[in-house]
Amino acid sequence: MSLSTFKGGIHPYEGKELSKDKPVKVVLPKGELVYPMSQHIGAPAKPVVAVGDRVLAGQIIGEAQGYVSVNVIASVSGTVKAIEKRLVVSGNKETVIVVENDDKYESIQSIGQKRDYTTLSKEEIRSIVKDAGLVGMGGAGFPTHVKITPKDDSKIEYVIVNGAECEPYLTSDYRMMMEETSKIVEGLKVILALFENAKGIIAVEDNKPEAIKKLEELVKAEEKIQVKVLKTKFPQGAERQLIYMSTGRKINSTMLPADVGCVVNNIDTCISIYMAVCESTPLMRRIITVTGDAIKDPCNVNVKTGTNYRELVEAVGGFVTKPEKIVSGGPMMGIALFSLDIPVTKTSSALLCMTKDEVAEQEPTACIRCGRCVQACPSKLIPQKMLEYAENFDEEGFVKMNGMECYECGCCTYVCPAKRRLTQAFKQTRRSVLDSRKK
């Protein structure tokens, strides 16, 4: 039987064998921790501590400002050293709270208290998720409490857990599927408690047979939950592709999953919902894949939010050789770094260190009109024409070519024989259009 997939997409080298079979390694921070006030889509949090204050793990140090905003939680105990502007993964300088770790890891009293979610009301569950500072941990950072609060609960028919993890090299979700399987299922059950008409789908690519086996075994007695196996292809885990292949329903850039009766959460977000609701533990850690051919011992690490990226490299044995390219995230949709002195945030997923910068070695040439970018585009766009408008700063033409439907997956750039910088141009143009609309 053929597996569900979509038209377009690519099959890049996966690189997952470097880290997928090693258990997650717990790494405790050594020095100061840095907490950006904007680790999510929406308004930045507001610092509610002052320099010199002592904070505890689990304490709110940045308070959400408005509905589409998220609390920032201290992940260690220590003293507030500074509140200032510092470099973050985007390359911008943003307001951060710097905490000097006292190595005691003292936490607020409520941490770890068991709760039975079946005794809680919908409002209580959503309030717990909001207070815990949860965001979408697949990369976008959309506030989780907003995602699980649609206009009409009764219209949600599917709660989808995104276990595709289609980005090359990344294996953090896979390790969670192997090591914390029950928390994924229990987290999904917590979400399903909010939507009486919904069924649960755990969508996983077929390159993860052991994880699929464990999940299927755990949900075989669950009437409302199924594991859906998808064909391995990038970007199978993109929200639009995932919803379509799991339910047959389509969304575009102007829609939310709730508009077609769906709620989608990442594997680690699901675990975080379980931890917040059932074990009274806010979001204070990330599972990060530290990998690439420049890394001595590629593996996944469990780290406190706020930890410096440089400490992650040290924790896995350092570099085999000095890397030419360092990426936060995966090679397709990650962000290239020029410094390791940036903090782990709620949306950090991987640190990819490569001995060679293959992109820099490839000089773009003229488009040869081969059409490969059109064939690869999962959004059925025409990247070649979009690039013409982008390079000429014609935002109106770019929008007319449906350029805003691009979600910057990088497939077009990957297949282009002329090595054109398509995705980079689209990203810049889309940002410019969005900034113009805000004005």
Image: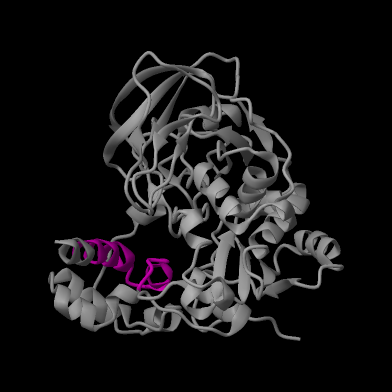
Q: Position of residue 57 (x, y in %)?
A: 55, 26
User: Measuring 35% from the left and 82% from the top, which residue is drawn there?
Assistant: 381
Quadrant location, the C terminus: bottom left
Q: Is residue 138 visible?
A: yes
Residue at point 60%, 19% (across, down): 106
- Counting every numbered tag in the picture gives 0
Q: Is residue 171 visible?
A: no
Give whichever of 191, 92 is nearer the camera.
191
Q: Is residue 369 magenta?
A: no
Image position of 50 with respect to 405: above or below: above
Horizontal and vertical percent position of residue 297:
63, 36
| Picture quarter with the N terminus | bottom right
Find residue 283 and report its horizontal and vertical position in percent. 55, 40
Quarter-of-image position of residue 195: bottom right
The one of 387 and 246 positioned closer to us in this rendering = 246
Towards the viewer: 237 or 421: 237
Residue 277 spot, x, y in % from top left:
65, 46
At x 31%, y 24%, the residue is 83
46 left or right of 350 in image: left
Q: How is the image coloured?
A: one colour
Give yes or no for residue 429 being in the magenta stretch. yes
Left or right of 400, for residue 314: right
Q: Is residue 16 above or below residue 113?
A: below
What residue is at 49 percent from the left and 50 percent from the top? 135
Find the magenta span and give its range: 406-432
